Amino acid sequence: MDKPQPDDLKDAGLKSTVPRLNILALFKSGQERHMSAEDVYKQLLAKGDDVGLATVYRVLTQFEQAGLLVRHYFEGGKSVFELNQGKHHDHIVCLQCGHVEEFYDADIESRQEKVATERGFAVHNHSLHIYADCNKKACPHKH
Amino acid sequence: MDKPQPDDLKDAGLKSTVPRLNILALFKSGQERHMSAEDVYKQLLAKGDDVGLATVYRVLTQFEQAGLLVRHYFEGGKSVFELNQGKHHDHIVCLQCGHVEEFYDADIESRQEKVATERGFAVHNHSLHIYADCNKKACPHKH
DNA sequence: GCGTAGATGATAATAGTTCTCATTTGCAAC
DNA sequence: GTTGCAAATGAGAACTATTATCATCTACGC
């Protein structure tokens, strides 16, 4: 239930191949919303799907270009992907446990747009990352 | 005029060595506000300063820890440094020419704080990067 | 001036990601 | 259902940004 929809791939002009279906299914399974290439690779291997790391990188990039996934560049070097569910949002990253929480604030959004256009820029996209401690009571979100 | 102040280094608990003075002087010269390690390395070599790349990386990290510089993680993998002049600000990065413009918006700042505390997070720092086109008239900011 | 802890620089090592290319596979035409 | 071929895959090499190693050098207090 919640099988991958090959249509997503077809619509994006991509052949529906085994690795692509597996990767899409992993994101749709919703276990982890935010995954790096390495994360995806390991999860697939753990599930028994035999896939190459190069393919994971390739497919993630294709999915990003197709709009199926969104890529984030958090601090720490590696980029992280999440399913694109249409609604833009920003992120709070816990520095203790790495937990990522999403939020959306209309005021922040509109002021960003304002700031950019005031300066003559045409906004493509933006990233707002708040790095913080969630640890009120010893980091509820386990690593 | 605008020579490096060894005091900055001493205050940070760092010996005032030739490479450190040169790197600090480069940032204070104000030619480029935002530079990657590679940028700094090349600029110094171009100026005739003989320095090792490893030293540049080390010194930039030390300066960041000492609060002399601020490090930014823009899209594209490499991190970028700028002189820490006390006033926090965010960035608009031009996707065409790489030009970086700074801005500060008190409303955005306060709403970020609000969003985070509402969710029980203690903010350490944040990064807001707007990626946009500055090209009103063929990208005024040359690469 | 001297001694030493700390700094440097050449190079090796590492992490994340992309490239190469021989082999395999999806899929459309027969 | 087979066939053909462009596109996709996977193993590993290559690449980029950065950090670690370590023998040599240097700033600076005595």
Image (cartoon, coloured by chain):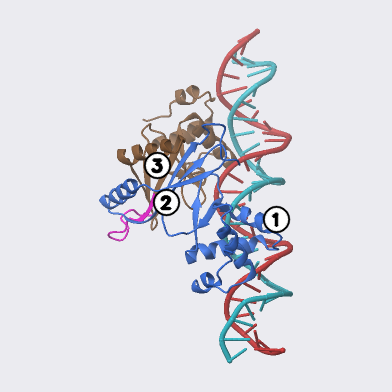
Chain colours: A brown, B blue, C red, D cyan
Host chain of mark 3: A
Q: Residues within 10 Å of mark 2 (few under 14, many from 20)?
A: some
Marks 2 and 1, the one that precedes in the sequence: 1
Q: Residue B138: percent from the left, percent from the top?
A: 57, 32
Q: Nearer the viewer, residue C14 or A85?
A: A85
Which portion, as a residue range, is magenta? Answer: A130-143
Q: Nearer the viewer, residue B89 or C27?
A: B89
Q: Nearer the viewer, residue D2 or C22?
A: C22
Judge whether residue B59 is colored magenta: no
Q: Which residue is mark 3?
A: A33
User: Which amino acid type corresponds to the residue marked 3 in the rendered image?
Assistant: Arg
Q: Which residue is mark 2?
A: B89
- The residue drawn where x is 52% and y is 74% is B10
Q: Are marks 1 and 3 in contact (CB under 8 Å)?
A: no
Q: Residue A32: percent from the left, percent from the top?
A: 40, 43
Residue A83 seen in this snapshot: no
Q: In this rendering, which labeled residue sits more in front, label 1 or label 3?
A: 1
Tell me, for residue B46, which label it has, or none.
1
Between the residue at mark 1 and the residue at mark 3, the CA separation in whole angstroms equals: 46 Å
Between the residue at mark 2 and the residue at mark 3, the CA separation in whole angstroms equals: 30 Å
| Quarter containing the N terminus of chain A | top left
Q: Residues within 10 Å of mark 3 (few under 14, many from 20)?
A: some
